[in-house]
Amino acid sequence: MEILILAVVIALVAVGAISGLVVSSRKKKQLPPTAPPSTPTITAPPAEPQVGEDAVETAEEPRRTIEEVGLPEAEAEAAPVEAPAAEPEAPAAPEIEVPEPTAGRLVRLRARLARSQNSLGKGLLTLLSREHLDEDTWEEIEETLLIADVGVAPTQELVERLRERVKVLGTRTPAELRGLLKEELVALVGTDFDRAVKTESGVETPAVVMVVGVNGTGKTTTTGKLARVLVADGRSVVLGAADTFRAAAADQLQTWGERVGARTVRGPEGGDPASIAYDAVKEGIAEGADVVLIDTAGRLHTKTGLMDELGKVKRVVEKHGPLDEVLLVLDATTGQNGLTQARVFAEVVDITGIVLTKLDGTAKGGIVVAVQRELGVPVKLVGLGEGADDLAPFEPEAFVDALIGD
């Protein structure tokens, strides 16, 4: 019995000792060690929450009733509600322009055409006004005509006729010489050609005009300007953008068309030009248009495959009806090289008319004579500047008059 009591007492003492150690360790954790005065104060991490005997009693605070709790004041003005973003407006349709009348346009553009008169018209008048027209003078006259790209055969014909008339005329006043030279040049250019662009097919389908030429002659721009010429003459036009190889060619042509209210039929870049030309004529028939203008890709006359493709475009278009006009665009500054181009194109698509661009400010006005003599087809339009209405119907008398000057 005594032994049992003694064991209980020992156990109680052991439990008390262990409890004291636990409490002591907890108190040590509660008080962080004080940093020495010389060292900077370091913020200790927050103390661990205390529970049990070590928990600090929470001070009681007076509680507020629900009536005493104030509500947050409403803002004086509610924030404006943003209106939903307006849908972007559709781009306004381009304003339809009224092209300048084509009647007498070449006369109005005479100042630009006359820039080339120094080497041709005035040069000839100066030589013919010499007191003695010896062989050297006639050779200079011949050289002047050749430099102006009149061509060898036409130059020889003109010089011979001038020699005969000057010999018969005798005295040569400036007015007489000017009249004489004008008559001979007009005869050389030719007045018996039909220079009107065909805009009536003679059947119920629209007249179809195909524009061809090599790269860099201004073919797409010429097609757009030609649309303005036709609209100015009261014709309705549909444009076919069959130049699918040059970047932005279709966009350029469509811009020209929108300015005069002409619709442009186009296809994907790199698409089949013949297919687009076919669709353009089809749309022209559906709309009852007067004329369908087809702009083809610029082709080098030395590339046989491309020229064959141009022939394909012509054949496909003719499934709708006859091709009324094939206009070859030539750069007047290329001179005799333009004649080489003209010959090859004529073999492929049967050229019916010529458009001479960049004729303003050039000394190559004689190319009009040479290209007509080479192809046997008339120059129908001439480009005399960069303006939208600087494409003019060709008039032999006005052309020669501007070359000679006053």
Image: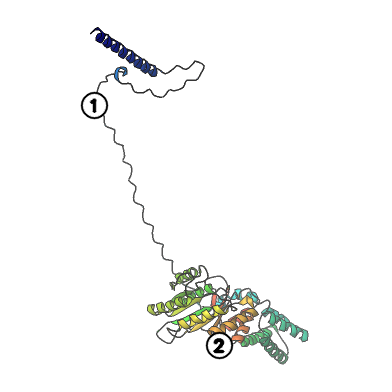
Q: CA distance from mark 1 to mark 2?
A: 108 Å
Q: Residues within 10 Å of mark 2 (few under 14, many from 20)?
A: few
Give, as a three-letter code, the residue at label 2.
Phe
Quadrant in the rendering for residue 113: bottom right
What is the x, y in percent for residue 356? 58, 78
Quadrant of the snapshot with the C terminus: bottom right
Residues at badges 1 and 2 in contact (C-beta under 8 Å)? Answer: no
User: Which residue does the numbered mark 2 point to in the structure image?
Assistant: 193
Identify residue type, mark 1: Glu
Q: Which residue corresponds to mark 1?
A: 68
Q: Where residue 123 sits: x, y (%)?
A: 70, 79
User: SS at mark 2?
Assistant: loop
Q: Nearer the viewer, residue 361 or 184?
A: 361
Disc number for residue 398: none
**Within 10 angstroms of label 1, few (less than 14), some, or many (20 or more) residues?**
few
Q: Position of residue 135 (x, y in %)?
A: 77, 86
In the rendered image, the vertical position of residue 342 relative to residue 59, given as above or below: below
Whether residue 30 sits left or right of residue 342 in the image: it is: left
User: Circle 1 — which element?
Assistant: loop
Q: Is residue 235 visible?
A: no
151 lies left or right of 275: right
Q: Is residue 80 above or below residue 215?
A: above
